[in-house]
Image (cartoon, rainbow, N blue to C red):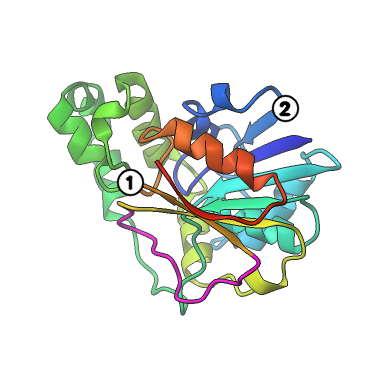
Amino acid sequence: MTLVLLHPLGADHRVWDPVLPLLGEDVMAVDMPGFGAAPPLAGESVTPVELATALREQLPEEFDVAGISLGGWVALEMALAGWARSVTAIAPAGLWSAPLAPKRSVARLAARGLAPVLPRVLRSERGRRGALLGTVAHPERVPYEDALRLVRAYADAPGFEAANRGMRAGRFEGLADIEVPVTLAWCSDDRLVSRPSVVPESAREFYLDGCGHVPTWDDPSAVARVLLAGTASTPAVRRVK
């Protein structure tokens, strides 16, 4: 069974690179529309449902799906629609209590403005820490090449603004209605997303210690264990170290 991996807002499929060697061969990390090499969808606002629908056309007939942040929300939409065999959402967006107010990303504007000097900034541990600490708990674990690619993807994504608007304007309300196995993972050092007060008892929950909002560099082994457990059917609530 193919495991499809979806990236967070502002990243691309390469965010999964640290984890891929730990998952086996039948894995498919994809770029969502408007990110990486994928062309954006039309419109000033693009919702997670629209992203999920656009991606469905390029996926296998049967698959498991997992995602981080916005990718987690899109993965949940796929599961709610009945397309996926199971879903794993790491720090998923959309489970907030009410839609968020519109907001431009100051960090993205800064990344765009610093584009000419990014290579020099990110070669230093201090510069890498300043650029990544909002999403990664241990910026020192991100290799220079990965850090440069990640920040450039964030700055250059043509679909960022539309996806950001669509994400902030709504919320995911179908968690209890998903009929396939649901696994949720929360990161101990996440500065952007927190666990909602109510989670269906049917959902498995994992806690990633020492990890930030995007945990793939913080602890790739722990992330891989969560993803592999997410394709199983035995419920579990546990902490992953």
Q: Is residue 83 above or below residue 117?
A: below
| Prevailing SS of the magenta stretch | loop
Q: Which residues are magenta?
A: 190-202
Q: Residue furthest left?
A: 126
The 10 Å Cα crowd at callout 2, few under 14, some 14 to 19, many 20 or more, is: few
Mark 1: secondary structure: loop
Q: Is residue 151 magenta?
A: no
Which residue is drawn at the image coordinates 65% and 58% (left, top)? 182
Mark 2: secondary structure: loop
Q: Which mark is residue 26?
A: 2
Q: Amino acid at mark 1?
A: Thr
Report if residue 42 is visible in the image.
Answer: no
Which residue is drawn at the image coordinates 56% and 21% (left, top)? 21
Nearer the N terminus, badge 2 or badge 1? 2
Res 1 quadrant in image: top right
Which residue is the site of mark 1? 135
Depth-wise, is mark 2 or mark 1 nearer the camera? Answer: 2
In the image, 157 versus 22, the foreground residue is 22
Q: Is residue 122 above or below residue 192?
A: above
Q: Is residue 192 magenta?
A: yes
In the image, 11 versus 173, the foreground residue is 173
Q: Amino acid at mark 2?
A: Asp
Q: Which mark is residue 25?
A: none
Which residue is drawn at the image coordinates 20% and 21% (left, top)? 123
In the rendered image, residue 59, in percent from the top left (x then y), is placed at 77, 40
The answer to whether residue 133 is left or right of residue 201 is: left
Q: Is residue 142 above or below residue 138?
A: above
Q: Is residue 75 above or below residue 116?
A: below
In the rendered image, residue 69, in percent from the top left (x then y), is placed at 48, 53
